[in-house]
Image: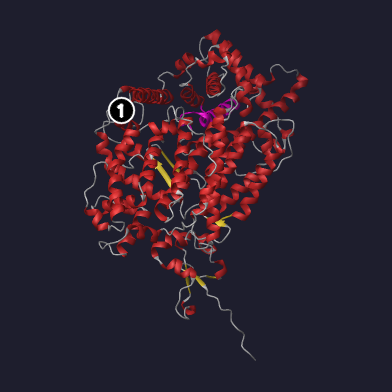
């Protein structure tokens, strides 16, 4: 009898639990047993010694993992075809002086840490900052007008002021000085008023309370027409009764009653007025609506800060009422729309407030229960003890109580729909797990006739999408995610609304797709074909072009005869989307500049990059503080990419010079730096070594797909000479950014042009240029502020 022929396939053995798994499962980073025990990070597979043999050749999987330098960055991130790793093998926690927050896997922060080219840029910034604090400190004196600005901005302002004295054209000088001073003064004043603390909160409330006539006759009608459809959390009659009662009581007593909830009503009035002011201010219609002039004359800057002070005075962290919850949601809405940094640079503050709002919803009973069993709600006990509910029923006849019950349940449902929609949107923007951990598929609610009620029927799809991403962000199955996104988009098409909310929802879906595609593109290429990698590369460029076209249409083609009072709301999602596209495009240009022999695409991308930055900063930089803060960062990045043939070479030159001089011992604890330095030692240490060979050994990059892609940019989508009169991006900080890059560019050109294989040892022996340390010192605004604001004697 012939012996059975054994299957000739290698067995992979886990290094932790010694369990085997078949080779067809090799794509999974860790075995199920190690995942269950929490040993994912140390789980690696090796070929059983009994099965090694033959000609001694390495298998494809073994050769990929045999190199210790690549094991951390490639093996852990490896995934089977059709799957993508959104985590880059780690969960990154960011921190600054006032906050610690985790980076969501779909956020713009994730774009930076997932791409090692951008991470090298970030590490380089950290190192440069530490070495330049003393130099910048010497230039930090500014006038009292800018005292409320961060120290990072003060120093750049000082450097820029020096450059103004050297301008040659009187017209350009006058124009630049006017714009420069106007922006600095405006943001300084806004930051001061937005962060001020009030010694006597009740006296401040009296001082800032909007006049009765202006609020009831001007503000409230505008709020109902332009703002309330975007956030339908109020019953119009209940709101009017509450506000009129406040003005009546204040006129009689001359003071506010805490027991009657007057302070919450004042906070509501202030936030409503502020939102209406923003809606009118950001309207791009060329026809001025004179009936709103009285509103624009109000100084609404301190209103949000005062609302923050008024809310906790009603024991908000211990108990809650319906008006308090509504006021919290208004505040959340304001933070999203605010030109200042209401939600934080990375939307990190939104989850804190959203968690409070969710807890308050559960406390008062506004939850999925209001949809499942609306007929079982009984507000009799609330009516008898709470004046807010009493107002809702005050004008009701005894037989109309049931109708009033229905109106309150309907209000509960609308509040829950708004909170649910905001929770899902923020989760899709950041990739963080949603706060509301359940979903359902309710019947259609045609009686509401608003966007949020329509979106309730889609929540189960959003929940499925977020669950697929958060179950295992390191191995997201694209075959499961893509159909869900397609179904959401298809269902959205059934709602013919062309409101600001529909525009925002579509843009969020496109950002989800963009982030997933970016992760697939920069992931390990050992398990994808060259054709698939080129397809991802081309699709990434096509999506960037497509989104840029949306941005151009949004800013340059609005109707000039119709008022658009919703732009104050949609500006924020456009800003988030543009910043993400900007970051991804920066990484693509870095790769082309440093890893591609074919540089034909770089000039095209640089032109596109400049136009995108010009659009971003000229349209949003005058009004939005976060955009203003990024202006210098973007200007320096642009000059590095434009004027330097190989930016990665310059960054490696700087980092290794610092390591050799002993100034970066603490930086070795960072994973990327430790990896680079360890591999440098393995490859010879002090011996002559081409730095780009070292980088390409650690981060193998496929970059041979540029041929033919110039055709994607043949159609010019950006208007020509749109900012010919004055381009904020081109003109602003021009002197300062030149000062930071001039010596480094000369050194880089000399090193690369005359000796492309310059050794690390030779570079370290060269003297540092006086401005080289400042090159990337302000690339990351958060880090720059962290270091500089800690200087003694600075405010």
Q: Position of residue 553 (x, y in %)?
A: 57, 34
**Nearest the eye: 627 or 205:** 627
The residue at the point 74 percent across, 23 percent down is 401
Tell me the magenta residue range.
Answer: 315-342
Which residue does the numbered mark 1 point to in the structure image?
Answer: 167
Q: Residue 400 colored magenta?
A: no
Assign the N terminus to one quadrant of the image. Answer: bottom right
- Residue 53 sits above or below residue 791 on the image: below
Q: Of all residues shown, which one is farthest toward the top?
A: 252
Residue 97 shows in this picture: yes
Q: Quadrant of the C terminus?
A: top left
* Residue furthest to the right: 399
On the image, the x and y values in percent for residue 188 come to: 38, 25
Here the colouring is: secondary structure
User: Is the residue 133 above or below the residue 268 in the image?
Assistant: below
* Residue 616 percent across, percent down from the top left: 47, 34
The count of marks equals 1
Image x and y of residue 668, in percent:
32, 54
User: Could one spot residue 245 in this view of the protein?
Assistant: no
Along the line of sight, the residue nearer the viewer: 744 or 626: 744
Kindly indicate the quadrant of the structure image that contains residue 630.
top left
Q: Nearer the viewer, residue 469 or 614?
A: 614
Q: Secondary structure at mark 1?
A: loop
The residue lying at 29 percent from left, 37 percent from top is 739
């Amino acid at each position: 009898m012939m012996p059975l022929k054994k299957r000739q396939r290698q067995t992979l053995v886990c290094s932790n639990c010694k369990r085997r798994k078949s080779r067809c499962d090799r794509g999974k980073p860790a075995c199920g047993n190690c995942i269950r025990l929490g040993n994912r990070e140390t789980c690696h597979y090796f070929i059983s010694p009994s099965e090694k043999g033959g000609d001694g050749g390495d298998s494809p999987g073994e050769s990929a993992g045999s190199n210790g330098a690549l094991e951390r960055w490639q093996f852990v991130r490896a995934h089977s075809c059709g799957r993508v790793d959104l985590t880059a093998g780690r969960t990154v926690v960011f921190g600054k002086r006032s906050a610690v927050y985790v980076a969501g896997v779909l956020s713009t922060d994730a774009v930076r840490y997932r791409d090692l080219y951008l991470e090298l840029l970030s590490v380089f910034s950290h190192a440069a900052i530490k070495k330049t604090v003393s130099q910048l400190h010497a230039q930090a004196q500014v006038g009292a007008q800018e005292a409320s600005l961060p120290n990072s901005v003060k120093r750049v302002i000082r450097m820029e002021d020096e450059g103004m004295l050297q301008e040659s054209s009187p017209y350009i000088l006058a124009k630049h000085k006017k714009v420069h001073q106007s922006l600095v003064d405006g943001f300084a004043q806004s930051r001061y008023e937005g962060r001020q603390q009030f010694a006597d909160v009740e006296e401040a409330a009296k001082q800032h309370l909007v006049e009765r006539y202006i609020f009831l006759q001007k503000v409230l009608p505008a709020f109902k027409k332009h703002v309330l459809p975007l956030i339908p959390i109020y019953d119009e009659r209940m709101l009017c009764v509450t506000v009129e009662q406040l003005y009546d009581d204040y006129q009689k007593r001359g003071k506010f009653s805490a027991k009657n909830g007057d302070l919450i009503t004042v906070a509501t009035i202030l936030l409503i007025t502020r939102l209406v002011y923003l809606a009118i201010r950001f309207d791009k219609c060329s026809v001025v609506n004179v009936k709103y002039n009285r509103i624009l004359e109000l100084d609404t800057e301190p209103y949000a800060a005062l609302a923050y002070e008024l809310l906790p005075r009603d024991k908000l962290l211990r108990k809650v009422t319906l008006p308090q919850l509504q006021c919290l949601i208004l505040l959340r809405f304001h933070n999203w729309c605010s030109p200042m940094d209401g939600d934080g640079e990375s939307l990190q503050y939104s989850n804190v407030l959203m968690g409070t709002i969710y807890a308050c919803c559960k406390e008062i009973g506004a939850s999925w229960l209001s949809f499942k069993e609306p007929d079982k709600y009984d507000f009799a006990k609330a009516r008898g003890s709470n004046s807010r509910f009493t107002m809702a029923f005050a004008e009701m006849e005894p037989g109309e109580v049931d109708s009033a019950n229905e109106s309150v349940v309907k209000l509960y449902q609308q509040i829950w729909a708004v909170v649910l929609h905001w929770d899902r949107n923020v989760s899709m923007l950041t990739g963080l797990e949603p706060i509301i951990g359940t979903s359902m598929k309710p019947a259609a609610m045609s009686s509401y006739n608003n966007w949020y009620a329509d979106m309730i029927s889609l929540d189960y799809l959003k929940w499925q999408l977020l669950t697929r991403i958060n179950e295992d962000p390191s191995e997201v199955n694209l075959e499961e995610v893509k159909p869900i996104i397609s179904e959401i988009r298809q269902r959205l098409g059934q709602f013919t609304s062309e409101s600001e909310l529909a525009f925002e929802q579509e843009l969020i879906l496109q950002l989800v797709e963009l982030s997933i595609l970016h992760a697939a593109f920069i992931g390990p290429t050992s398990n994808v074909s060259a054709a698939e990698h080129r397809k991802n590369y081309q699709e990434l460029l096509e999506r960037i072009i497509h989104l840029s076209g949306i941005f151009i249409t949004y800013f340059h083609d609005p109707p000039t005869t119709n008022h658009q009072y919703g732009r104050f709301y949609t500006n924020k999602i456009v800003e988030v989307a543009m910043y993400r596209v900007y970051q991804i495009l920066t990484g693509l240009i870095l790769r082309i500049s440093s890893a591609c022999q074919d540089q034909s695409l770089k000039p095209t991308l640089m032109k596109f990059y400049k136009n995108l930055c010009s659009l971003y900063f000229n349209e949003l930089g005058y009004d939005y503080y976060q955009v203003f803060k990024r202006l210098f960062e973007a200007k320096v990045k642009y000059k590095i990419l434009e004027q330097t043939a190989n930016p990665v070479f310059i960054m490696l030159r700087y980092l290794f010079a610092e390591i050799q001089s002993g100034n970066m011992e603490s930086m070795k604890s960072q994973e990327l730096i430790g990896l680079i330095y360890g591999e440098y030692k393995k490859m010879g240490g002090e011996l002559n070594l081409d730095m780009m060979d070292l980088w390409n050994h650690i981060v193998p990059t496929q970059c041979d797909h540029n041929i033919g892609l110039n055709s994607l940019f043949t159609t010019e989508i950006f208007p020509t000479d749109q900012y010919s009169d004055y381009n904020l991006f081109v003109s602003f900080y021009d002197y300062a950014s030149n000062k930071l890059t001039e010596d480094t560019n000369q050194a880089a050109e000399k090193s690369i042009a005359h000796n492309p294989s310059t050794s690390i040892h030779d570079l370290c022996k060269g003297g540092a240029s006086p401005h080289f340390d400042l090159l990337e010192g302000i690339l990351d605004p958060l880090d720059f502020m962290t270091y500089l604001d800690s200087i003694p004697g600075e405010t």
